Amino acid sequence: MDQGRDFEISASRAAEFARRYIEHLGEVLKRLDFEAVAEVIDLFLRTRAGGGTIFLLGNGGSAATANHFANDLSFGASPDGHKPFRAVSLAANNALLTCLANDIGYENVFSWQLRNLMRSGDVVVGISASGNSPNAVNALEYAASNGGIPVAIVGFDGGRMKQIARYVIHVRTEKGEYGPVEDVHMVLDHLISNCLAQVRE
């Protein structure tokens, strides 16, 4: 077997896959509702002005996005000379997450934290590709029922979270396209954080 030839075929296929993936990702990005993005940016600015907190949450890759987003809001969007954003990821405390999951159920790991931390007027951002993760749905429902402002950053058809949230950024894709959805969610983190960094208060 000519292993070198096999590698050339494999590399060629990989390059074509990469090209098609990036082209598809570009089409998904073009479908974004930029007015919806602007509304979330304005909400974050109003929350900062009022001294409120922005809570972020998600599972798996979306938990990583929530952590990254909280980092970018707390530091990248809050440079010296700016009033800082109060941003907290509810996916960041592993000890508390496992405690709550073990004792009261994984579906309650975010809503219980909000019960302890959220004040009226705070923003709760749920990040989910499907929009149907029970713990994220419960968190947005808790926010909506207790004076918080629920925001959904979702993919696929938007799921239950799209119906609950007051503000929605919907990355429209076919169901199961986790990679492109999560890619765009990270773009939104950087887009929003960089925009906010330009606004002094």
Image: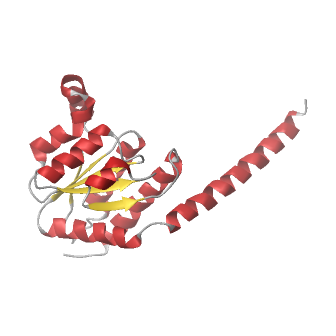
Residue 97 place in picture, x, y as percent: 24, 32
Query: Tag count in the figure?
Result: 0
In the image shown, does 58 or 93 lie closer to the viewer?
A: 58
Q: Residue 63: give x, y in percent of width and height.
A: 35, 43
Vertical order, 158 against 32 (above or below): above
Can residue 71 be seen in the rendering of this structure?
Answer: no
Residue at 22%, 45% in the rendered image: 139
Q: Quadrant of residue 191?
A: bottom left
> Which of the colour schemes (rainbow, by chain, secondary structure, one colour) is used?
secondary structure
The residue lying furthest to the top in this view is 102
Taking the image as drawn, is residue 117 in sight? yes
In the rendered view, would you say 179 is above or below 25?
Answer: above
Q: Residue at x 57, y 64 (%)?
A: 27
Q: Is residue 179 left or right of residue 126?
A: right
**In the rendering, at what x and y percent does residue 135 appear?**
27, 39
Figure quadrant of the N terminus? top right
**In the image, is residue 107 above or below residue 63?**
above
Q: Along the line of sight, which residue is nearer the eye, 67 or 156?
A: 156
Tell me where residue 201 sits by quadrant. Answer: bottom left
Query: What residue lies at 85% left-to-right and 33% top-to-bottom?
Result: 3
In this rendering, would 65 be left or right of 44?
A: right
- Between 43 and 176, the one lying in front of the other is 176
| Image coords of residue 114 (percent x, y) | 15, 44
- Left or right, 129 with reference to 92: right
Residue at the spot x=10%, y=55% of the render?
147
